[in-house]
Amino acid sequence: MAGVWDVVEESQRAVWSFTPFEHVGPLRFGMTHDRAAAAVEGVLKTIGWRGDGTTGRVAQADMWPVHHGTGAGVRLYYDRAIGLAAISIDARSGPQVDLDGIPLVGRVPSLLEDALFDHLTAHGLEAVFSLEANLCAPELGVVMRVQRAGGRVLTRPVLVAREWAPRCSDASESHIPDEEWRSFS
């Protein structure tokens, strides 16, 4: 049986491509939850669903592997006005997400930061750090969070739709729900 801090081997992870503001693997920004569930049918299943009781604007779905062992751990955030608005990938069990050859999931944060800085610089894009010290690239809709894996931390990207990107680096003003900013394990 897998332990709570176990990390899926890189060779066992599915690899999902990421095109900013368009898709993360089979999940497309703007889609409904029914369409998202259909897009990952046979691979992921929804194990939790809840709306935001304060505003009613954001709902959340947790999706985990259909079969125990290898698979994906993905959290989806839906905005009533646009549909699928953000996707966070679990550092320990999620698929690997590839941005132009850069793997974003389950990496040592400092190594990923170097690769991402180089990529952003090469494309004339800006990197910013949130007050929580998360590397963010609003022009790509990327917020690099971290997640505990035993005695280490690994990268857990939050990828957002264009409508959520302008303030995605600011925990107090972004559309990303507070729970995501507080998540570390």
Image: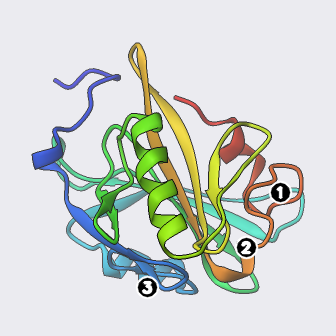
Where residue 119 sits: x, y (%)?
Answer: 45, 64
Residue 3 in which image quadrant = top left
Classify 69 as above or below 85: above
Where residue 18 sits: x, y (%)?
Answer: 39, 73
User: Of the numbered discs in the image, which one, if any, rests on residue 53?
Assistant: 1
Where residue 28 sits: x, y (%)?
Answer: 46, 83
Distance (Cα) linking label 2 and label 3: 20 Å
Which sits in the foreground, 36 or 119?
119
Numbered disc 2: secondary structure: helix
Q: Name the amino acid type tagged 3.
A: Arg
Which residue is at a point 16% across and 38% down the rendered structure image?
Answer: 9
Q: Name the amino acid type tagged 2.
A: Trp
Say whether disc 1 or disc 2 marks the residue closer to the N-terminus.
1
Which residue is at a point 39% across and 34% down the rendered structure image?
Answer: 108
Mark 2, residue position = 164
Mark 3, residue position = 35
Distance (Cα) linking label 3 and label 1: 23 Å
Which residue is at a point 29% across and 56% down the rendered structure image?
Answer: 96
Which sits in the foreground, 17 or 57?
17
